[in-house]
Each structure stands twice: as structure tokens, then as C-alpha cells.
Amino acid sequence: HSWIRSIIKTIDTEGDGYIGVEELTEAMERTYEFNGVQGSPWKMYVSIAHQILVFHNVVTDEMVFEHDMTNKVLKDIVKANFQAEKEVAERNHILDLKKQDLKDRQEHYAATKLHFFYWKW
């Protein structure tokens, strides 16, 4: 299983022979640049068994090999990637808004308590 050792060696940035959570997260972020779009059901990789490029829909478990690719499938993949990219951007925007709202609420609560203490003295 030299290909497994090769993958571990590639991901293992510390060189200790083990893959930590931080290393795995960093490797996953890097793969989004080349292995499909974050949130998209379509992933692209090289099949070890067949030694060819595979487009794999992880939701429907549909696999399209490089030589079976058609324009329709390619259009579906591109459409799903654009949609997933937009959804991830919207989720991140909503998360940022929620974080800002929480911060505003905490600051308002702290200001209210300080105001209360000022009048109590």
C-alpha cells in the first residue's frame, strides 16, 4: 500500500507519520481548489483502480468516468458547482451576520448593566 503512505506523507506537514485534525482540515481546504467546489455534490478525482479521471456525485452515488463524459453531464456539474458556490457564500454571510448580532447584543447588555450600576451608586 505504497499509495497510502504517499498520501499520508503528502498531507503530514509535521513529518511525524500521523495526520492530525489541523493537517486534515488544511488538506481538505486545499482540495476544494482542485477537487470540486465546497458544498457541491460532484467531486473529481483519479480512480486508483481504473487509473482514470472520475466525476463522482456523492449524493446520488453516480460515477462518470473520463471517457464517458458528455456535454449534458458536464453542464450539470458546472451548474451544481455554481449553485453550491453561491450557497456556501450565502451561508458564510449569514454566519457573519449572526456573529455580529451576538456581539451587538453582548455589548448592549454590558452597556445596560454599566448604566444600571452608575445610577445605583
Image (cartoon, rainbow, N blue to C red):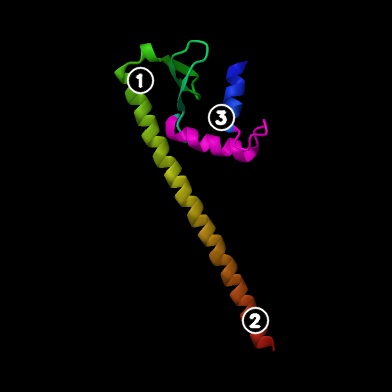
Residue wearing tag 3: 10
Where residue 105 appears, as percent x and y from the top left, is: 57, 66
Distance between mark 2 and mark 3 Cα atoms: 58 Å
Residue wearing tag 2: 116
How many marks overall? 3
The amino acid type of the residue labelled 3 equals Thr
The amino acid type of the residue labelled 1 equals Val
Where residue 52 appears, as percent x and y from the top left, is: 44, 14
State the quadrant of the N terminus: top right
Earlier along the polypeptide chain: callout 2 or callout 3?
3
Q: Residue reaching furthest front?
A: 15
Residue wearing tag 1: 73
- The residue nearer to you, when weighing 3 against 22, is 3
Answer few, some or many: residues within 10 Å of disc 2's Cα (few below 14, many 20 plus, some between 14 and 19). few
Distance between mark 1 and mark 3 Cα atoms: 31 Å
Earlier along the polypeptide chain: callout 1 or callout 2?
1
Whether residue 82 is visible here, answered yes or no, is: yes
Earlier along the polypeptide chain: callout 1 or callout 3?
3
Q: What stretch is highlighted in magenta?
A: 12-34
